[in-house]
Amino acid sequence: EIVLTQSPGTLSLSPGERATLSCRASQGISHTYLAWYQQKPGQAPRLLIYDISRRASGIPDRFSGSGSGTDFTLTISGLEPEDFAIYYCQQYGISPLTFGGGTKVET
Amino acid sequence: EVQLVESGGGLVQPGGSLRLSCAASGFTFNTYWMHWVRQTPGKGLVWVALIKGDGTTTYYADSVKGRFTISRDNTKDTLYLQMNSLRVEDTAVYYCARPVSGGWGPNHYWGQGTLVTVSS
């Protein structure tokens, strides 16, 4: 099983600041099968980024993904008030599919 | 518009069984892999199971293997999760989800979730 470790656990920032979230895999991710999700309280997750760096439909370009192998990053270039939420990475290259433990972005 | 609507959650005693359903609409159901993902209240996301569009191939998380069965009825556009030998640690909101495109992930469309509580 590929274990995904997200850091930091909590990121305290202000609107307008840049957020950099990390996701480290216990072994290399197959192909480019790494995604990022956003989740707000009481809501289902929302897909932001897939295939490491492809934005899902309707996702603003302030969200970007990068990385390769075992180290991946989600960057939010300038935090908007609606971006304060929990973010999860997921690998979907091999079963069992796995999620990271999440990073909470708070103000 | 893609819609996924889960049902069947509720309170069940340890060792009991429950069947969740997920009614799908707005897309050609039998051409997509489908997932179940769960989330313990206040905790992170955990992938549970996966089934191919024609129902011939399934995968499970180790924590549910042998106890849970994912299935689908493509004549009814409905996904199921049969949960047997339920444990307290199975308590969670269960989501069904559909991938972006023809492969098995990632999940672009999610239902609203159904809460399963395992408690005596």
Image (spheres, rainbow, N blue to C red):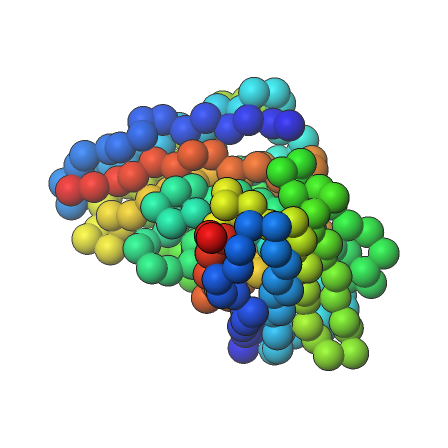
Residue A13's x, y, as percent?
Answer: 17, 36
Picture quadrant where residue B7 is located? bottom right
Residue at the outermost right position = B56
Residue A104's x, y, as percent?
Answer: 29, 39
Picture quadrant where residue A98 is located? top right
Q: Is residue A96 above or below residue B77?
A: above
Task: Describe residue A25's horizontal placement relative to residue A30 as left or right.
Answer: left
Q: Is residue A45 above or below residue A76?
A: below
Say which of B85 and B72 sits in front: B85
Say which of B31 and B21 sits in front: B21
Q: Is residue B21 above or below residue A79?
A: below
Residue A69's x, y, as percent?
Answer: 58, 23
Can the viewer see residue A30?
Answer: yes
How many numbered circles are shown? Answer: 0
Residue at image location 78% in from the left, 78% down from the top:
B75
Residue at image location 62% in from the left, 38% down from the top:
B63
Residue at image location 43% in from the left, 58% down from the top:
A44
Say which of A58 and A3 sits in front: A3
Can the viewer see residue B38?
Answer: no
Residue B117's x, y, as percent?
Answer: 47, 56
